[in-house]
Amino acid sequence: MQVVLLGGWDCAEHQVWLGALRSAAPQVGWLDAAQAAIDPGRVEVAVVANPPAGSLSAFTRLRLIQSLWAGVDRLLDDPQLPPGVPIARMVDPAMNEAMAQTALWATLALHRGFFAYAQRQREAVWRVHAQRRAAELRVSVLGRGQMGRMAAACIAQQGYPVAAWGLNERPADTLDSVQQHAGAQALLPLLARSDVVINLLPLTAATRGLLNTAFFAALPIGASIVNLARGAHLVDADLLAALQRGHLRHAVLDVFHTEPLPHDHPFWRHPRVTLLPHAAALTDPRSAAQVVAANLRALQDGHPLANLVNRANGY
Ligand code: GLV
């Protein structure tokens, strides 16, 4: 079986991925873009990390597109994406764990005011603020997929009251420590009871621009927002206005409309924005290669494929 590996990487990163994938799945023929272009009709699987739009259109006999990214929004936006080919997204246990750690770090830092202390250090100001208990900070996690569920569980374990929200109902979660909410009508009432909101939703037509003025207005004064999902969930100008009005206390942002974030973007220097360079959770080649290898084996053996994307739902 011929498998092409395509990503918007530099050469060193490509080699790391190729090495990890080759050792996890030595039975398949791994090709780079140039090798695959010689006879694209022989390529049966494309393993991709946000490849440039149009780069899959030459592969007319694909049986699987396996993403190395958890979010497949950019892939699905490609107008030349071969129709009808199953797409699997990355569900990497190490990545879920990293995301839960970042969500917990943001919660702890917002709860204890560590971002405010960091700002005071820059100003050489020695001032202590009141210390709240974890039980006094209500955390809502938007998104009840693998990442949302792990983040919610990890934060609840530290004693925070945690609610999880998703657009759709899903089979009852066994996690008693996390309150479950579903449906558009449940969102604003939940926001009214949230001190910290962590966004881990997939980016779809229904969630694009969700973090906007109406959303922020529904939060109590002094609430904070943590966006670890996609930049396009957030209306930047609405966030800046809500921070400016003093309605929102702080924003932790990992993802942006344009990445890298342009140097002149106001988020860079905003005293109440903490930002990361899309690093909340990186795909780990060691575990992700095992996930890919398992799907390649399933394809070869005619078994069901894991983590398939529903193109209509967008995730
Ligand atoms: C990262 O943002 C991913 O979707 O894997």
Image: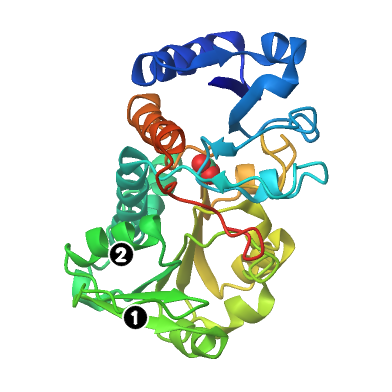
Residue 191 position within the rendered picture, expressed as x and y whole percent measured from the top left: 48, 82
Specify the amino acid type for callout 1.
Gln
User: From the viewer's perspective, is the residue at label 2 or at label 1 nearer?
Assistant: 1
Q: Residues within 10 Å of mark 2 (few under 14, many from 20)?
A: many
- How many discs appear? 2
Label 1 element class = strand
Q: Check the image and report above or below for 144 versus 292.
A: below
Count residues near mark 1 (Cα–Cα under 10 Å), then give few for <14, some for 14-19, many for 20+. Answer: some
* The image quarter in which residue 33 lies: top right
Q: Is residue 87 visible?
A: yes
Q: Quadrant of the C terminus?
A: bottom right
Residues marked 2 and 1 touching at CB (< 8 Å): no
Determine the secondary structure under disc 2.
helix
Taking depth in this image into account, of 35 and 299 the one nearest to the observer is 299
User: In the drawing, what numbered circle is on residue 180?
Assistant: 1
- Picture coordinates of residue 228, whole percent (x, y): 49, 52
In this picture, is 58 found above or below 310? above
Q: How is the image coloured?
A: rainbow
Q: Residue at x 53, y 21 (%)?
A: 1
| Residue at horizontal 38 percent and vertical 61 percent from the top | 148
Task: Identify the residue at horizontal 17%, vertical 62% (top origin).
Answer: 158
Three-letter code, disc 2: Ala
Q: What is the distance, in whole Å, between disc 2 and disc 1 at their CAs?
A: 10 Å
Position of residue 74 relative to residue 137, above or below, is above
Between 302 and 182, the one lying in front of the other is 302
* Residue 206 in the image: above or below residue 288: below
| Numbered badge on residue 152 | 2
